[in-house]
Image (cartoon, coloured by chain):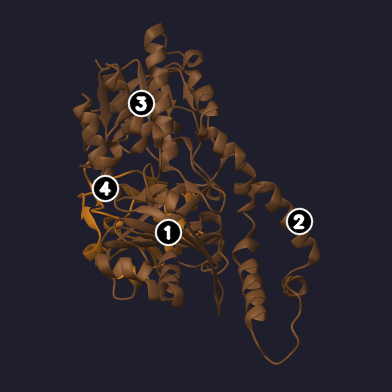
Chain colours: A orange, B brown
Amino acid sequence: MITDHLFELTGYRIDKESHITVNREMCTSCDHRACVFTCPAGCYEWNEAGARIDFAYEACLECGTCHIICDKGALQWNYPRGGFGVRYRLT
Amino acid sequence: MHDAIVIGAGPAGVTAALRMAQKGLSVLLLERGTVPGEKNMFGGMLPNCPVVEELLPRFLQEAPLERHIVKRTLCLLSDSSASSFVFESKNFDRPPFSGSTIYRPVFDKWYAQKAREAGVNLLTGCLVDALLIDGNAIQGVRIGPDRAEIKAPVTIVCDGVLSRLAQKAGLRKTPEQDALALGIKALFRLKEETINERFGLVRDQGCSHEFIGCTRGIRGGGFIYTQTETLSAGLVLHLDSLRKSGFAPYDLFEEFLACDTVRRLLKGARLVEYSAHMIPEGGYRKVPRLFADGVLLAGDAAGLCYTNGLNLEGMNLAMASGFHAAETVLDAFQKHDFAAQQLARYQSRLENSFVLRDMKTYEKSMDFMRNDRLFSVYPEIVSTIMERIFQADGNPRKKFGRIGREAARNALPLGDLVIDLLKGGRSIL
């Protein structure tokens, strides 16, 4: 899968802190968890064992899909700090 | 204090900043990437945009353009077949060309450099997360960890499709799922000679392929564009339709890459980069309010983007809107008036230019594209018709009209067909 090789393919300057905050409490009762399959970088995963959303901001492509898809208000969505985040070389 | 602040060093922002600087204004251009363009991605082709040549007369000679498009293919895919319509023109093989492929990180960086040479003060690595708002008027921005104030009588907001700042300025709401499409794209490296041979090109000629019927019925399509030594292949997926489908974009993408027609075009090419970006698909009706006291919106932030099925334009609309925003600001400086009433001229400028006129012309096309059948039923019907026309099986042939009627009758109710024909016709004819 293409998303397995994201860090080899696409450049990033990763910030220490996440630019998106997930309110996991809200995700527990979410009836669609569409963020899990719609994120083109596969940043969201439903952890069945822990019954929670696992989220990795590091691979975020900053497209905003999760921000638009999440209708539960569970995301505090921002762009990364200036100078951080995805860095396309050619694309 | 600067005369004007421009937020976002994409095509809209750089055009606006460049124009204002050329006319003597002191302009601060703010970009959240460390280099302009490093956050930017698009499908593939910058359509010819005369406004830019007005600003940079040597644009065609100097800009880092990859290949100019001389050949365009629309391909309808079904499970068993592919039907392509190919158009090529000698007229597109000479300046000013119909459009060129570019790398956005390369092009945007070059373009921003031109703005700097014209005197624009470019500050990179700078995310603007707040505007200075006094009553109804925008008076500048806040930047940095200490939220430093930078003031200017006018701010042009070009912060892209999600435009957080247009929302903060009260000009628009968060765009909705049905007004957005997700674009994903991969860049593949292939030798220049191989690209030329495979796609039937010479020199710096290029071509584009659009695919319909490759998205499991999700509204959207696929594309392949040629650069000098790379191919861009990707999918555009309407967000509401994607969500309803339950499919992951990268899985759909792998399927697209694996289908025979696409696989042959990409054979031997090495994957080198993957990217994703949102596309405004709301059309004319979803264009927000474009101005308020001390502020103008341009480019994707203003939802300026459209498709009619064959034209897919946004970057040229961004540049032209940036230009008109700059002209509006220049007028405002003459009058020393930055109130909404004065800046309203921006709206009429865009309405008189191709920017809003094209969006209005194809307003109904954008609605028509929200018809699911276009991406599932119709590619199958075309496939059935073409197979029946070309199949020789010892049985007597039927006239094309009869084949068509039968194929359509078996695939969808007559009423739907009639409605689609009427709506489709009205949207483009």
Query: Element under label 4?
Result: helix
Residue B172 makes an appearance in the image: yes
Q: Is residue B242 left or right of residue B21?
A: right
Task: Please name the amino acid that badge 3 sits on.
Answer: Leu
Residue B414 image position (x, y, % from top left)? 80, 65
User: Which chain letter goes with mark 1?
Assistant: B
> Quick check: do tags 2 and 4 share a chain?
yes
User: Which chain letter goes with mark 2?
Assistant: B
Q: CA distance from mark 4 to mark 1?
A: 20 Å
Within 10 angstroms of label 2, few (less than 14), some, or many (20 or more) residues?
A: few
Q: CA distance from mark 2 to mark 4?
A: 43 Å
Query: Element under label 3?
Result: strand
Nearer the observer, B401 or B414: B401
Residue wearing tag 4: B105
Task: Please name the amino acid that badge 1 sits on.
Answer: Ser
Q: CA distance from mark 1 to mark 2?
A: 31 Å
Residue B322 vertical placement versus B261 (above, below) = above
Within 10 angstroms of label 3, few (less than 14), some, or many (20 or more) residues?
A: many
Give the foreground label among 4 and 3: 4
